Image (spheres, helix red, strand yellow):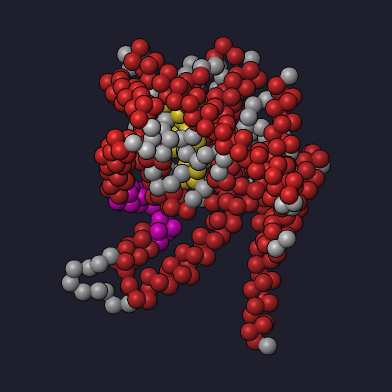
């Protein structure tokens, strides 16, 4: 039964939101807002299910004595402590803010720093992977743009920062980016339409 | 209604008519697509994974289903379902990680549907679709152990990513597993071009369903996408010529 109702509900809700966007009459706009608010509430409830999924994955990992189970235990303990503190103190309490500012933020920032090193290494490795003209152009362009942007210690290379880099960014990079984004936008549009007409159902059923 | 809204409505309506019209024509539409070696290599990696009893990892990205960037992940979910159907007989099922809880639930649903279609419902395991983290970098951090420790031989990193996808493609490179990677954002595409074994650029991300035979509608959709792209190219050229003539007159 759900295999019949799920697509019907999804298609009707999707069409109402789309029509409400293009023809924002009072009743359609209100209906659109209600459906979007329901979606937000459902997404909130989904986070709870997601956290349970995360817990079950790591409990299973500990139970099966898999590699990295120590980290899984640490994750579960941290999750439970944060959850209990959040429930008791509320999300705006200074302790909760400190947990975010002193633990989560620095860890994510350090991952960003690792990312920078990873990219330099990947750049060096690129020519080994893909020894073609496009890879060489990619690396040379990246080098010129970096030389044009970075504050150099002694003197600036003539023309690179003042002429070549702005030309690369305003002509080649922006026109290429627009082309790529147009392609992505068309892909997004058709994926949305496939789902809207029920031809593609990421919510189950076939 | 403002002019951009009218233009948007015309584009959406025309695309819908084109998609439905081409779908109704069924086999009369013989679309032939250019060769993208990454998909042929992925098919080979899929065969190897089934033979060797290793896993295929799908990374769906971290866009919320309530955001406009989730289309990329939805496109990959269709491929995931197809691959699960094909590899239902494998010892180790594919693994899907995502950075959004609703996307995790959808991936689990796709696993269940695929196993039902393949007649192997007993194979379904809820932990095959996982929430790895709820922010982009926590998602990357949560996915890294899966790439390293779960016997993965091929990775499909396709969805909505930021630059954090570089950490995933680097981890895949270190484990010497095959990586097919695509993202919807420009910074992520630049990172993947440098770090991934087989990067897909731009709209190629949305072509994966057609190239991996996820269903006829994906072929039709890609065909419609090509038609629309040519129309936009023609419109851009006409616009440029008109602008040029306006400057000359």
B154 vs B171, nearest the viewer: B171
Q: Residue at x 46, y 64 (%)?
A: A173
As for residue A65 lying within the magenta part, the answer is no
Q: With respect to residue B92, does B7 lie above or below?
A: below
As for residue A128 lying within the magenta part, the answer is yes
Q: With respect to residue B78, does B84 lie above or below?
A: above
Q: Residue reaching furthest left?
A: A154
Q: Residue at x 66, y 38 (%)?
A: A35
Give the main secondary structure of the magenta stretch: helix
Q: Quadrant of residue A65?
A: top left
Q: With respect to residue B228, does B108 lie above or below?
A: above
Q: In this view, does B191 lie to the left or right of A177?
A: left
Q: Position of residue A106 (x, y in %)?
A: 27, 42
Q: Which residue is drawn at 27% across and 21% down?
A: A70
Q: Which residue is drawn at 64% across and 80% down?
A: B244
Q: Where is residue A124 in the image (x, y as percent from the top left)?
A: 30, 51
Q: With respect to residue A136, does A166 lie above or below?
A: below
In the rendered image, which quarter contains the C terminus of chain B? bottom right
Q: In which quarter of the image is residue B150?
A: top left
Q: Residue reaching furthest bottom?
A: B249
| Residue B107 at least partly seen | no
Q: Is residue B221 left or right of residue A37?
A: right
In the rendered image, which quarter contains the N terminus of chain B? bottom right
Q: Position of residue B190 (x, y in %)?
A: 43, 52
A30 vs B64, nearest the viewer: A30
Q: Where is residue B12 in the image (x, y as percent from the top left)?
A: 71, 51
In magenta, the rendered stretch is: A119-138
């Amino acid at each position: 039964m759900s295999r019949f109702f799920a697509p019907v509900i999804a298609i009707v809700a999707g069409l109402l939101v789309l029509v409400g966007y293009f023809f924002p009459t009072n009743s359609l706009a209100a209906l659109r807002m209600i459906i979007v608010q329901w979606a937000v509430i459902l997404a909130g409830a989904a986070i709870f299910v997601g956290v349970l999924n995360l817990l079950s994955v790591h409990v299973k990992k500990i139970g099966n004595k898999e590699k990295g189970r120590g980290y899984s235990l640490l994750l579960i303990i941290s999750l439970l402590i944060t959850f209990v503190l959040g429930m008791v103190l509320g999300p705006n309490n200074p302790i909760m803010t400190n947990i975010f500012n002193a633990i989560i933020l620095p860890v994510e920032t350090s991952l960003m720093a690792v990312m920078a090193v990873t990219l330099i290494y990947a750049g060096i490795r690129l020519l080994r992977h893909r020894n073609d003209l496009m890879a060489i152009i990619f690396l040379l362009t990246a080098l010129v743009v970096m030389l044009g942007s970075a504050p150099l210690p002694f003197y600036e290379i003539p023309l690179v920062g003042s002429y070549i880099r702005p030309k690369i960014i305003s002509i080649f990079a922006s026109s290429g980016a627009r082309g790529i984004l147009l392609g992505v936008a068309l892909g997004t549009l058709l994926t949305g339409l496939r789902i809207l007409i029920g031809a593609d159902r990421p919510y189950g059923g076939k | 209604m403002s002019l951009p809204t009218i233009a948007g409505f015309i584009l959406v309506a025309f695309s819908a008519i084109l998609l439905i019209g081409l779908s109704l024509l069924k086999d009369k539409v013989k679309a032939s697509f250019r060769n993208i070696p990454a998909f042929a290599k992925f098919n080979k990696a899929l065969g190897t994974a089934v033979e060797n009893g290793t896993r295929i990892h799908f990374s769906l990205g971290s866009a919320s289903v309530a955001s406009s960037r989730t289309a990329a992940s939805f496109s990959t979910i269709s491929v995931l379902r197809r691959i699960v159907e094909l590899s239902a007989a494998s010892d180790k099922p594919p693994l899907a990680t995502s950075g959004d809880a609703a996307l995790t639930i959808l991936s689990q649903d796709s696993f269940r549907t695929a196993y039902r279609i393949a007649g192997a419902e007993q194979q379904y395991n809820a932990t095959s679709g996982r929430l790895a983290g709820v922010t982009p970098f926590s998602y990357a951090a949560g996915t890294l152990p899966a790439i390293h420790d779960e016997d993965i031989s091929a990775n499909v990193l396709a969805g909505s990513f930021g630059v954090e996808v570089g950490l995933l493609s680097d981890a895949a490179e270190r484990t010497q597993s095959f990586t097919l990677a695509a993202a919807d954002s420009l910074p992520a595409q630049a990172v993947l071009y440098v770090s991934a074994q087989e990067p897909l650029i731009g709209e190629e991300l949305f072509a994966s369903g057609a190239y991996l035979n996820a269903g006829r509608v994906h072929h039709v959709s890609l065909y419609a996408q090509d038609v629309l792209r040519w129309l936009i190219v023609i419109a851009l050229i006409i616009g440029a010529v008109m602008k040029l003539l306006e400057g000359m007159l």
